[in-house]
Each structure stands twice: as structure tokens, then as C-alpha cells.
Amino acid sequence: MLISSAIFYYFYVQITYEKWLQKSNPKYPSPSSVRMEIILMMKGILAGTFCPALTLYLMSKKQLKGYCGVDEYGWGYLIVSFFIAWLSTDFFEFLYHRMGHTIDMLWNVHKSHHQFYNPTPFAVIAEDYVDQIVGASPLVFIPALVPINMDLLFFQVSK
């Protein structure tokens, strides 16, 4: 939110003719549209913390196979798991996003993210709560299935 706010301030509050020339959409969004983006973003942030919080809770109860540090499995395992987790989480995100555009039931959930004709930086994470929870679900499912460095996984799944 801080980064989005800083970018918004620079490009939308401190308006200059030079910045306006670089905009692909010459109009600026209405205050009510920006307000709606911020509200949807805040709801998304709230929902998006569910899976990370659940993961940390389950880790504290030793219910997941995640670990911290390198010593337990070594550098080789960490490097291999980095690429496997990277490819699998990226493919998961791509597939879920693609299905959100091609399956009517999922589009009904995902379309709230695309409702802003002239988006601001806040629209990047202005997603429905279901999108946020599903998008963060690899944080729970991957360490439930295989041992993985949790620092690495949190880094890769963070948006």
C-alpha cells in the first residue's frame, strides 16, 4: 500500500504536462473510482493475509513440512526447491488467472479486478477476497506436501 500510495502521489497528485503526455489514457480517474480501488485493495489485503497467517499457525503446531534456514536440507535442496517452487507457483498463478478469464463462474469473481477503466496503482492488488485467498494458497499447500524453506516460499508468493 505504501508503494502504491507513493506512485499514486507522484503520477496522479503531482501532475505535470510531461507526465500527462506519457499516460496511455489521457483522462484521470474520478475520486470515487480511486476510493473504490482503495476499498477493494484493503479488502483484498485483509483476505490475502489469511493463508500466510494459517501457514504460520500450522508451522508453529508442526503440522507442515516447511523449515527455516539452510542447514536442515542443504544448499543444493534449497536451490532446486527455489526453481521448482518458482515454476509451480508461477504456473498456478497463470492457470488460476487464465481460468478467471475463461470460466464464467470464476470470471464472476475475478472481474472486480478489471472494473476500473482507468486504473491507478491501487488497482494492482484490488482483487476480490476469493482471488486473494486462492492466490496465496500455495503458502499452505506446498509445505503441506513437501519440505520447503518458508523464507523462500514467502518471498516467491509475495506479490
Image (cartoon, rainbow, N blue to C red):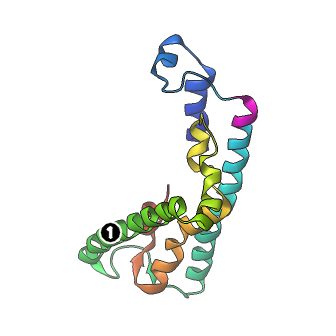
Q: Amino acid at mark 1?
A: Phe
| Residue drawn at (62%, 67%) of the image | 105
Which segment is the magenta one? 30-34
Question: Is 128 included in the stretch rendered in magenta?
Answer: no
Relative to 2, residue 43 above or below: below
Q: Is residue 152 left or right of residue 63?
A: left
Q: Give coordinates of residue 8: x percent, y percent.
A: 59, 31
Relative to 150, residue 18 above or below: above
Q: Give coordinates of residue 153: x percent, y percent.
A: 43, 68
Q: Residues within 10 Å of mark 1 (few under 14, many from 20)?
A: some
Helix, strand or loop at disc 1?
Answer: helix
| Residue drawn at (55%, 80%) of the image | 59
| Residue drawn at (44%, 66%) of the image | 95
Q: Nearer the viewer, residue 46 or 78?
A: 46
Q: Nearer the viewer, residue 121 or 156?
A: 121
Q: Give coordinates of residue 142: x percent, y percent.
A: 45, 78
Q: Give coordinates of residue 137: x percent, y percent.
A: 54, 72
| Residue drawn at (31%, 81%) of the image | 73
Q: Is residue 99 left or right of residue 80?
A: right
Q: Nearer the viewer, residue 46 or 71?
A: 46
Relative to 80, residue 114 above or below: above
Where on the picture, by quarter, is residue 45? bottom right
Where is the N terminus found, in terms of image quarters? top right
